[in-house]
Image (cartoon, rainbow, N blue to C red):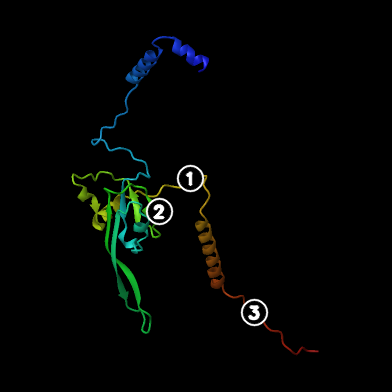
Amino acid sequence: MTEKNEKKKAVPGSGLVQGLATTFKNMVTPAHTHQYPDTPPELAPRTRGVIALIEENCTSCMLCARECPDWCIYIDSHKETIPAPTPGGRERSRNVLDRFAIDFSLCMYCGICIEVCPFDALEWSPEFEYAEYDLRDLLHEKERLGEWVETIPPPVALDDAAEEPKEISLAQKAAAKKQAALDAAAQPAAPEPPAEPRGSAE
């Protein structure tokens, strides 16, 4: 035990005085109370409120359902044959999404499903007012998940000091190269000089 602690222990009632000092300090400090629900709270841009489904981006790859640690994502789909666009072409098949549901009574909002989705079909929405009296109503089907899409905030702007993404620089180089080729093709060819006569007067 240090000498400082020994002095504090030697003074009777020092702990009580420190506790009362903390109490009085909090009494005179103004409280920052948000009058919810009359005043909506100011949420951070990346608030994890509810998961929204962009149905047209989903390919029924089942990657989100396999990676979900709570197994709270349910997906049903079927294959559909697309006829060949040209005669003699090959028919193609695609997955058609029949059901996409998330049970928010099991979800722990880890965000793994959003991170692993290769087609950005799942996004975070800051909406959090979807409490229910019955747990069974927390099973949101694709129709309700699609309603949250309108509440997805725009992406956060990049930091001014951050490096430019490689994809942007590569796209700019490719665009500049293509434009240079188009400009070169649009320029008229230089006229050839007139040919000199073969015979000359002596």
Element type at mark 3? loop
Q: Which mark is residue 115?
A: 2
Q: Which corner quadrant of the image does residue 15 belong to?
A: top left
* Residue type marked 1: Asp
Q: Earlier in the sequence, mark 3 or mark 1?
A: 1
**Classed neighbour count for the residue bearing mark 1: other residues with Cα under 10 Å, few (<14), some (14–19), many (≥20):** few
**Classed neighbour count for the residue bearing mark 3: other residues with Cα under 10 Å, few (<14), some (14–19), many (≥20):** few
Element type at mark 2? helix
Q: Which mark is residue 159?
A: 1
Disc 3 to disc 2, C-alpha distance: 61 Å
Residue at 31% x, 51% y is 51
* Residue type marked 2: Glu
Viewer-proximal residue among 121 and 134:
134
Q: Which residue lies most toward the right here? A: 202
- Is 9 displayed left or right of 127 in the figure? right
Circle 3 sits on which residue? 192
Label total for image = 3
The x, y position of residue 18, in whole percent, is 39, 15
* Residue type marked 3: Glu
